[in-house]
Amino acid sequence: MNSKENSTKDNNEMDEIEKNVCHECIGNKSLKEFIKAEGKKQPCSYCGRYRKAVGFDSFYDAIMDGVCYAYSRAVDELPVDEGEYVGKTYTSQDLIYDELSDEIAANDDRILDDIVENMPDETWCDKDPFDNRADDDFYSWDAFSKMVREKMRFVFYRISEENNRSLQPSDILDLISHYTREVRLTRAIRSSTKLYRCRTLDNDQWYTNPDDYGPPDSANAVAGRMNAAGIEMLYLAMDEETTLQEAYSPNREYAVVVQYRVEEPLYVLDLARLEKMKMPSVFDKENRDASHAIRFLKMFAKDISKQRMNKNTDTEYVPTQIVTEFFRYVNRKDGDRYDGICYSSSLNPGGTCLVLFMNREDVRRGKNGIHLIPSETHFYKKQFCELKDAKTAKAKGELFVNAKIAQSGNTPTEDIAASSFGSSKKSLV
């Protein structure tokens, strides 16, 4: 190599060493904050502006920290068959340009070029943080669901270590519980909040017994999204339109919507919040561990919201029933507790449904300050056309009387005039 070539090489190396990246050239929030925190005001090698910037070596280290968090060298993880890796693989260029370019959000493609140029010539594969075996995504929602539907569902929390897995299914539920707090999925249902429940009917023989609007008793409680057969829970919605859409049946012409009101704050697991929650960046050291729990909970929420897909109701909702029961009974540490779970409506986009962990007797006694408000009862026919006539007025009055009797426990029906249900509304709240 002649002296001119040596000089050119030295100059190129010097250019690499002196390169800086400013926070405005990177769109990723975590990387941007890193540059602001670690950088100093100096010229950016890419935009030419004088801003907070770090040397390219420091920026590259931050990139590789994220890369190595989410990906592994294929040679360390994947089996080989006939000279080819078994499983999805990436070149360094694939990783940066196809998998991570949107996440890095560099304003200048030269930044991506320089990252790839500095990366080792490796073949990469996905890393499973719950299990180092990349070909065995055991702790995904799909795998969890398959296991409890087809393999075991009553004793999985006591099984011994199997196939060298570092975590057991019960461990993954504990991790999910931890991260629901980390990502703030607890929601307070404030006092005076209105909640709605709909019942559909074959004819206009309106229900006037408050129990008919509570959970079915254990003998009649069929398997649902979150309850196994025989387990009582109160399914509600946060608005009237949602409860109508959720309960609608083309085989039933009539519907009644009753309103419950909350007197005491309730604390629920808010899965509806997950819809707007972005996955933490692989470059976000503080929060990225939560991404696995968020992904699990997103699939849990999706399965809860979706309509029944097959006739085998004994198994379809088993996974969501197990996770619900975990949050109801096991997830009670340091006095923390959930009164129910919020989830998005699949039939009324934007609407929110709610299940409260209350049985028929809980509702009857107004546990947690939940009370039926008969004066806000609405009656519908067919395309949810509201009915207001003498028959509905009578039904509303009878519902008020029966609700008052249920609340007091011993008030004779004849002592409460049906016409008084409107003026006495406050006493039921």
Image (cartoon, rainbow, N blue to C red):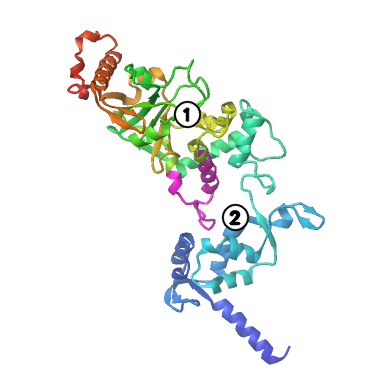
Give whichever of 259, 410 is nearer the camera. Answer: 259
From where the camera sits, is residue 136 visible? yes
Q: In the rendering, at what x and y percent does residue 73 appear?
A: 69, 58
Determine the secondary structure under disc 2: helix
Q: Please report whichever mark, 1 or 2, sits nearer to the chain's N-terminal start.
A: 2
What's the residue type where badge 1 is placed? Arg
Give the residue number, with chain letter if any, for mark 2: 69
Q: In the rendering, at what x and y percent does residue 166 appear?
A: 66, 40
Give whichever of 247, 253 is nearer the camera. Answer: 253
Taking the image as shown, residue 190 lies to the left or right of residue 333, namely left
Task: Determine crowd level at label 1: few under 14, some 14-19, many 20+ residues with C-alpha closer than 10 A.
Answer: some
Taking the image as shown, residue 70 lies to the left or right of residue 85, namely left
- Name the image quarter holding the C terminus: top left
Give the residue number, with chain letter if any, for mark 1: 328
Taking the image as shown, residue 331 lies to the left or right of residue 422, namely right
- Disc 1 versus disc 2: nearer the observer: 1
Q: In the rendering, at what x and y percent does residue 379 appear?
A: 30, 26
At horizontal 53% and vertical 58% (from top left) the residue drawn is 283
Determine the secondary structure under disc 1: helix
At horizontal 67% and vertical 30% (from top left) the residue drawn is 151
Q: Is residue 326 above or below residue 52?
A: above
Label 1 to label 2: alpha-carbon separation:
33 Å
- Span highlighted in magenta in the image: 273-300
